[in-house]
Amino acid sequence: MTETADLSFEDALKQLEKIVAELESGQAPLEKSLELYQRGAELKALCEARLEAARLQVEKISLNKSGAVEGVAPAEFG
């Protein structure tokens, strides 16, 4: 399994959706459900951090007087 921090937002979200579906199915035994929940919490935190970094990057986009992008500050993931 890929380390959580190495996942892209999209890959983390796909894994999180699979975990949610499996937990909602009620088919996983208790121990497996606990493992899935913990992994889901890690993925959720990663997705939230990536979204916040993207939001901050958007806020740092500077426009010139004509409305064209003049500069962008890089997002920091991690």
Image: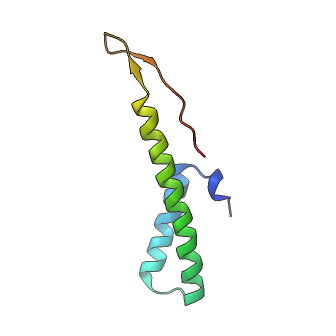
Q: In the rendered image of this protein, does residue 35 appear above or below residue 10?
A: below
Residue reaching furthest top?
Answer: 65
Residue 50 % position (x, y): 50, 47
Residue reaching furthest bottom?
Answer: 29
Q: Quadrant of residue 38?
A: bottom right
Counting every numbered tag in the picture gives 0
* Residue 29 shows in the view: no
Residue lying at 60% horizontally and 87% vertically, measured from the top left: 31
* Colour scheme employed for the rendering of this structure: rainbow
Residue reaching furthest left?
Answer: 66
Residue lying at 44% horizontally and 37% vertically, measured from the top left: 56
Residue 27 % position (x, y): 49, 87
Residue lying at 42% horizontally and 25% vertically, measured from the top left: 61
Q: Quadrant of the N terminus?
A: bottom right
Residue 74 % position (x, y): 54, 30
Q: In the rendered image of this protein, does residue 18 appear above or below residue 26?
A: above
Q: In the rendered image of this protein, does residue 11 appear above or below residue 22?
A: above
Q: In the rendered image of this protein, does residue 14 appear above or below residue 60?
A: below
Q: Nearer the viewer, residue 36 or 38?
A: 38
Residue lying at 52% horizontally and 67% vertically, measured from the top left: 41
* Residue 44 shows in the view: yes
